[in-house]
Amino acid sequence: MNTSAPPPADTAAPRSPRSRAPLVRLVLALTAALASVAVGLGLAQPAAAADWPALSNGSSGANITSAQYLLAAHGHGIDADGQFGPATEGAVRAFQQAKGYGVDGVIGSETWPGLIVTVKEGDKGHAVSAAQTALNKHGAGLSVDGQFGPATAKAARAFQDKQGLTTDGVVGPQTWQQLIAEGGGDDGGGGDCYIPDPDPEVIRVVYRVATDLGVDDRVLLAGFEAGVVESNMNNLDCGDRDSLGVFQQRPSQGWGTPEQIMDVSFASNSFFTRAIEEAAADPDASAGTVAQRVQVSAFPERYDQVEGTARKLIEQAKAMD
């Protein structure tokens, strides 16, 4: 039973729904505009924001390298070697304690937001190196020099556009979260990576490096066959044991540091330099055989089997060049 008192006789009649409609539309429009501004400023997360990965002692890969650079940016100087060992764990614990976080030595959902540093064109330092490393994980092919110049800004905009983010070239909270969360795991072992469709940027960089080196058609095909077999032309941050990158090269086998291997330009140059030598030593070898002699795979027949796919991707790369 309604026990509230009746309104005074002179109370104005409530507005009709029709009279309130313009005001409601105005409020909704202002709310949407403010939400858009908040997202653009990094004050709000997009609805489909990716989860922050949890990195701990024993992890390896490009995300570890980025985290190490970010720790250095906060004054916790450690080597950015892509290996989460005792020194990195100690730096993480010190950072967490300074920030008032739970001190567990794990870089997870609480630690990442405080660790990232927004960087933009004109900035320089360890945080820029972290962003360049993360962009290279997605095939940017940047030199990790700590200088946020036009090339880094262009790579940031390209990544943002691909992810549906605000395309401003600024690596802020949203962009950082997508950079770190996407592109495979960071546990440094196991071949259970998620392998997406071929990445156009990786295709472009591999082709560019090959043409800059002046490789012939056979060596070019060998490179694309290897890329298709090993990663489906993606710069994977995971793989069997310590394998990484587009060609699944292993730091433990002398291919470079994790950071270097995750640089698509570096990895491509390493592959094609060896492939040129192998092709010259055996003029009659197929492209797949050349790829196998570089990769030393347990399944040598796989490379020639993907020749058709590799040739299609080469044509795609030519169209982008």
Image (spheres, rainbow, N blue to C red):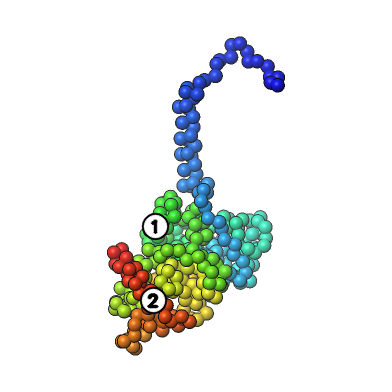
Q: Which residue is mark 2?
A: 305
> Are there few (<14), some (14-19), or many (20+) residues within 10 Å of tag 2?
few
Look at the numbered discs 1 and 2 and tell me whether their residues touch, using CB distance below 8 Å: no
Q: Secondary structure at mark 2?
A: helix
At 46% across and 47% down in the image, what residue appears? 40
Q: Earlier in the sequence, mark 1 or mark 2?
A: 1
Please tell me how crowded label 1 is: few (under 14), some (14-19), or many (20+) other residues with Cα within 10 Å. Answer: some
Q: Is residue 145 left or right of residue 321?
A: right
Q: Is residue 3 left or right of residue 249?
A: right
Q: Is residue 263 above or below residue 282?
A: above
Q: Residue at x 42, y 63 (%)?
A: 197
Amino acid on which disc 2 is placed: Gln
Q: Amino acid at mark 1?
A: Ala
313 or 138, which is in the foreground? 313
Indicate the quadrant containing the C terminus: top left, top right, bottom left or bottom right: bottom left
| Left or right: 2 in relation to 79 | right
User: Residue 64 appears at what percent x and percent y?
Assistant: 55, 67
- Residue 171, above or below 57: above
The residues tagged by marks 1 and 2 sit, at their Cα atoms, a distance apart of 32 Å
Provide residue 234's location: percent of width, then percent of height.
43, 67
Tally of numbered discs: 2
Q: In the picture, residue 121 is in which quadrant?
A: bottom left
Q: Which mark is residue 158?
A: 1
Instruction: Choose between 207 and 304: the one closer to the eye.
Output: 304
Looking at the image, can residue 60 be seen?
no
In this picture, is 37 found above or below 235? Answer: above
Q: Is residue 126 above or below residue 30?
A: below
